Amino acid sequence: MRLDVVTIFPEYLDPLDVSLVGKARARGPLDVHVHDLRQWAHDRHNTVDDTPYGGGPGMVMKTDPWGEALDSVVADGYESGAGRPVLVVPTPSGRPFTQETAVRLSEQPWLIFTPARYEGIDRRVVDEYATRVPVLELSIGDYVLAGGEAAVLVMVEAVARLLPGVLGNAESHRDDSFAPGAMVDLLEGPVYTKPPLWRGRGVPEVLVSGHHGRIARWRRDEALHRTAEHRPDLIERCDPAAFDKHDRATLAALGWQPGPGGRYVRGPLADAEGDDGSGDPEPATGTARRR
Ligand code: ADE
């Protein structure tokens, strides 16, 4: 896979030389090109931004440097036979970048990232390129970064680890939290390694039992507990057909029940437990007050 990143801070992308992505680069599955946008700024000060039309705070990145940069990068990639590029525009106003997006991107031969600073890039650049190549405007989360470079690092790492031969164990990402295709997206539970005793803390007995069935069940219960606590929205989204009998019992013990549409919702017991922090369940009569 070929990756191009056009930025005013090329050094910000230095971590792409390190660890998993660095190795993928050195070994060949990833061909990374980082470009300084200011190469395509032609005035004395290498200006890449200007004041916004319509007024307002901050600056907007100018059309010309981006237009020339992208023309040049695209021409170079086509010449080297990279296939068809997908333009990835990191922006807090983009669609959410998810594991599913990472999988889709990992299937592409060539990605071009355009991390912006200031208030973003003049809209005409994206509109122009959208007539030539697929463009994805993506956000890595509901917060605003000072620029898109950190978002590029996040997306590249999530994509690179999915490329064939990049992770040591080909199976490693099959069980990832959020692996697409899974009927249930559960967060992964805790993991342990040696020593068996650390500062008086042991390892859950079941993990050293050698009993694979019990270990798998324990891991799934831990995943259900963790998901219910940290991401109840994921439980609510799950297809209930994906829960086996034991899952349903675990969820019921955590205060979850099938709702009117069949999907699981947190029942009155769970609400009551969350309410006063005492952990004491409310009497069943005091039920749906908070729903
Ligand atoms: N640039 C600034 N904030 C961002 C975000 N949350 N995601 C992607 N790019 C960004």
Image: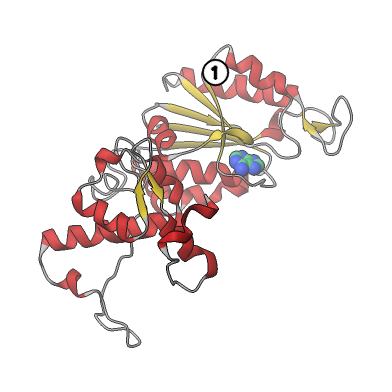
Position of 34 relative to 225 (above/below): above
**Residue 201 % position (x, y):** 32, 83
**Residue 252 % position (x, y):** 31, 56
* Quadrant of residue 25 within the rendered picture: top left
Identify which residue, 257 or 190, lies in the foreground.
257
* Quadrant of residue 222 within the rendered picture: bottom left
**Residue 145 % position (x, y):** 66, 47
Residue at screen point 43% across, 44% down: 158
Q: How many marks?
A: 1
Question: For the view shown, which residue lies furthest in the top direction?
Answer: 131
Residue at screen point 48% across, 52% down: 288
Position of 89 relative to 267 (above/below): above
Quick one: SS at disc 1? helix
- Would residue 9 be seen by someone viewing this image from the given angle? yes
Circle 1 is placed at which residue position?
75
Question: For the view shown, which residue lies furthest in the right direction?
Answer: 55
Identify which residue, 182 or 72, lies in the foreground.
182
Q: Does 21 sit left or right of 53 as displayed?
A: left
- Would residue 25 be seen by someone viewing this image from the given angle? no
Give the quadrant of ligand 1: top right
Residue at screen point 42% across, 23% down: 82
The quarter of the image holding the N terminus is top left
Q: Does 50 sit left or right of 127 as displayed?
A: right
Identify which residue, 249 or 38, lies in the foreground.
249
At label 1, the amino acid type is: Ala
Identify which residue, 236 or 26, lies in the foreground.
236
Q: Does 276 sit left or right of 181 as displayed?
A: right
